[in-house]
Image (tube, coloured by chain):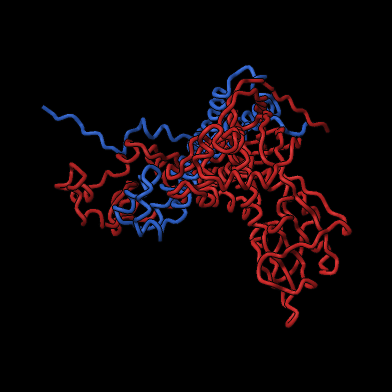
Amino acid sequence: MKPAAQPTLSSTPRDDRNCGHIFPGWKSMGLWFSMLLIAVLAGIGQDRFYAYLHGRLTEEVSISQAWVSRVGNTFAYLFKTVLVLAVGKAFCQAFWLSIRRDALRLGTISAIFNLLGNPLNVLDQELRKKRFGLLTLAIITWMIPLCAVFSPGALTGCQDTAIHS
Amino acid sequence: MAVISSAYTNIVPIQAPVITELYGDVGFITFGPSQSYTGPSGQFIRFIWRLWTSGEIIPWPSPCGSNCSYSSIYIGPAYDCVNVVPSAVPNLTVTGPTMPPETLFYSTSLEGNLSTEGLWVQYSSNGLYTNLTTFRCQLYNATYDIAVQFINNQLNVTTELTYNEPVNLTMASTYTLLPEEYLLNPGGFNGVNPNVAWIYANYYQIHLMISGLLEGFVAENPVNGSIEYYTSLNLSPLVGDLSSEISFPQNFPQKIVDFLTNVTLSMTYFLLHPISASTDATKPPALYVNTNATIVTYPTRYAYSSSTLWAMYGAAIGSVAVIIALGCYILLKNGVDADMSFSQVMVATRNKSLDDLCVGACLGGANISKDIRNTKLKYGELRGQHHHVCFGKEEEIASLRKRGHAEISNVRTE
């Protein structure tokens, strides 16, 4: 009996048809700009919410202080999440470009591959020396969540001795 | 612009600290083995010195919260200090080492008959020893009407004094120096009520302590012109450093009145720090009394700082916008929308030489040897195999051209 033909990994016609004339990256680009737009809208939403609360007595607001805090934190969380996703996606693209450039140790490639999830990978010397751009992107990704830590502090409660115009 | 304050006020009963009438042994005086007067107690001396050197009352914790007020009344000793016209000033005995009287800037008289009339103080009000002002402080039994206010836990006390009757210092000194048994037994000394005797004795002890602080003189040395002083006055914030400049407060008599007021107010200190058991104290100098307090509650308003928010968000949005632009450029350069998925890794690692390299390390983890980790790999087109893009050893991989993926994929379709 004649054995079945073994398909090769690199020659499946179905895969090749996916690479048509339309640039395959348009989805990613659309996603990027959508994420940026969501972040801007989250920031504006938080700004408007806080501006509405500004100067009001805590008793005047229909939701409790705990819920005010939760709503503010939700905006901040949404903001940082979409930005981290956007930078993470850019990091992927930069990774695949960077590994074409020159040869790297397998350990370094592993370190880059897992860099966003494990900051200890910065200890890899070759990564620090040869792929500083990727390291910078990773550091920005780690820093963005700080926005969600500090931005709710823009709204504070103060005792009623303020000057109102 | 208008300041809008919508503070809420509540009147609630509280227990406020206040001093007693000192009608008993409150621990200011100590007696020796034969029940004879030996002087002020150590704790009382430290208490007076603390007030003298700080110039402020010893605050007590608020009994009604951080923002509240209450009023209270108590009876205690008080000075009435008045200036004496020069024609009525008697010859004052200067205590301390003898100095030529014409160089005196400050002196007190505590001895002789004048001392029974109170505390006599002479001081230079304009820095010249030729122009001395004299005042006399007479001790009174007085009613203190105090208004206590706490603002953010900071104590502020306003007092109003009503002088009842002057304290006969001769009689008071007699009571103070009496053996303790006379003060304890009703009618023990000429039929005097021991409570009254104790009040006088305690008042006199306070007077003695304050007199001791003011005692002495400040004078100019006639030989070398230097300032010499023999007084504890320079240890109080009332005056500056006497050795460099002689400067007495404008309202010096009132300052003495205020100091005794501070002493009486600060006796609430003994509520938290009772006079030690080493004395024979049987009565507290202060206790808690029921009164009403007005508690002020300030409602909370939200305050938003948009600059705080947008300083962070602006920086984040700006930097991410640049990164997205860079990502778009890289995406165009890659020619393929690659990600970090398992399928992406799988298709990028189809290489016979990598299979050979990984023999024995299939389980990963510790099985991945150092040699494997140190192997240099590159992503590109495998030499000798037409349009096969994957990871491979450095020497077997040729660099991809710009938009390599797309070109190779298109070639395969043909």
The quadrant of the image that shows the N terminus of chain B is top right
User: Can residue A22 be seen in this snapshot?
Assistant: no
Give x and y (percent) for residue B374. 26, 57
Residue extending furthest front?
A: B190
Number of marks in the image? 0
Q: Nearer the viewer, residue B157 or B208?
A: B208
Q: Which chain is blue?
A: A
The C terminus of chain B, quarter of image: top left
The residue lying toward the viewer, choosing from A142 and B392, is A142
Residue A131 falls in image quadrant:
bottom left
Question: Which residue is at 70% across, 58% downward?
Answer: B112
Q: For this rendering, which residue is in front, B323 or A149?
A: A149
Q: Check the image and name the residue furthest to the bottom.
A: B223
Q: Residue at position x 39%, y 37% from top?
A: B413
Classify residue B375 as left or right of residue B156.
left
Front position in the image: B76 or A128: B76
Picture coordinates of residue B344, whole percent (x, y): 35, 39
Q: Position of residue B161 (x, y in %)?
A: 75, 37
Give above or below for B66 relative to B316: above
Task: Say which residue appears at 81% left-offset and 49% top-offset.
Answer: B82
Residue B23 in sight in this render: yes
Which colour denotes chain B? Answer: red
For residue B235, side relative to residue B402 (left or right): right
Q: Is residue B79 above or below residue A75?
A: below
Residue B309: % across, % down? 62, 38
Name the residue furthest top.
A62
Left or right, residue A143 beside residue B248: left
